[in-house]
Image (cartoon, coloured by chain):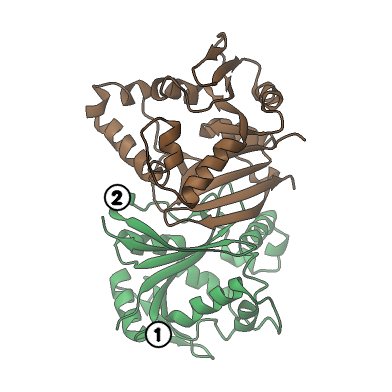
Chain colours: A green, B brown
């Protein structure tokens, strides 16, 4: 049986999945750490992801050390990882991740990067291989489906890539960790999605002390 | 003991509390019913409020007839009504309501309308009296608090009025019925709120089959 195509993100109560973009090189450079724009970005990102960072699974998977919280938040983070047989991401998310991820990238599966850049597959220790797909989102998804087998395909991000898959009717379901945070400005999750093309059913809604985990299935009207 | 100041609205998953505005006279005129903009407005509004309209309490309170659904959605609609000792609303919401509400307006308490229009109190059958306040939001709230006694004051809407009270630090808590609907465009609930001035705690999160009822308390950072 073929798996599902899903995305899973954290969203602020006012609909943003990330702070306004700053040059990713700045975030990971020593000079950038003193840049007020970078400090502002990191402060907002940390508030948004505050539910995830202390979880045992998150710390394990990024090799941040032993320990961490257990409970619903941890169970959901782990289940999201375990259901994923392959991921798809946009070029900007890959560029940021290439600077941010540890050598052992946290996917441990094939990852298909939608990009105009031609590049040979890039194999990382621990089972993650990045494949660079130059012929569009459908091709990337086909390849990810084949690689995932009976597990699911995660559209990892960023917002623009998620919106392209949503707009093309290629998402079966999605999960949002709704954080009790207002961003005011940032990168909206649902900007540029034509709502006439999507009908949602709320299939799960699980509160943790920190966020509410919402799951929707997508049907065409 | 003084009551709390709260608001309670339905919000689309992408953050809108109403469709883009159309002239309210059009919505309630016979010609307007054939206007595509009005039809579009009504279709979106009905999707957003789909959880509320079939509830027994809603039908009772607007005298739409006997019967209706019971359960969590109904309990929450009724509890929101019962905790409210007085309401505050903006001029546009009042203008729309003046056309939309039945003669026995559905508040059954004092309602304070923030407006530049000078007008004598307007008493309706069933216990609703509209008071027109010309000296700003703080004055309207003070009068509503005094009228509410130990019950709570509801900032009824619309979005701009809610945002003014939020921005002034005058909201103690708020509830959102988060509907599984994407609007794409419309009137955002949290537009023009400075997030640096508000910290939220998620205090309740109760899923019904139709929506998720979220409650947040507001603290200053």
Q: Going by the picture, which residue comes out furthest to the right?
A: B1
Residues beneath discs 1 and 2 located on the same chain: yes
Disc with the residue nearer the chain's start (1 vs 2): 1
Residue A209 in the image: x percent, y percent? 65, 63
Judging from the image, mark 2 belongs to the subunit labelled: A
Q: Going by the picture, which residue comes out furthest to the front?
A: B66
Q: Quarter of the image holding residue A58?
A: bottom right
Say above or below: A68 vs A213.
below
The answer to which of B125 and B13 lies nearer the viewer is B125
Say above or below: A85 vs A53.
below
**Distance CA(mark 1)–CA(mark 2):** 39 Å
Residue B73 in the image: x percent, y percent? 47, 49
Q: How many marks?
A: 2
Say above or below: A188 vs A218.
above
> SS of the residue at dot 1?
loop
Residue marked by disc 2? A196
Q: Quarter of the image holding residue A103?
A: bottom right
């Amino acid at each position: 049986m073929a798996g599902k195509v899903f995305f899973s993100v954290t969203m602020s109560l006012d609909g943003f999945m990330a702070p306004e973009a700053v040059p990713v090189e700045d975030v990971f450079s020593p000079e950038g750490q003193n840049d007020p724009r970078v400090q502002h970005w990191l402060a907002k990102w940390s508030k948004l992801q505050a539910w995830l960072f202390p979880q045992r699974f998150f710390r394990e998977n990024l090799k941040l050390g032993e320990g961490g919280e257990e409970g619903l938040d941890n169970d959901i983070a782990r289940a999201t990882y375990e259901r994923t047989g392959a991921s798809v991401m946009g070029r900007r998310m890959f560029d940021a991740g290439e600077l941010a991820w540890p050598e052992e990238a946290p996917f441990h599966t094939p990852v298909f990067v939608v990009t105009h850049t031609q590049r040979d597959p890039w194999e990382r220790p621990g089972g993650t291989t990045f494949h660079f797909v130059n012929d569009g989102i459908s091709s990337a998804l086909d390849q990810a489906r084949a690689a995932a087998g009976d597990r699911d395909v995660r559209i990892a991000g960023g917002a623009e890539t998620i919106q392209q898959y949503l707009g093309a009717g290629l998402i079966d379901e999605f999960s949002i960790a709704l954080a009790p945070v207002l961003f005011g400005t940032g990168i909206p999750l649902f900007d540029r999605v034509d709502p006439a093309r999507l009908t949602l059913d709320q299939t799960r809604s699980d509160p943790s002390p920190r966020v509410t985990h919402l799951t929707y299935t997508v049907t065409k009207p």
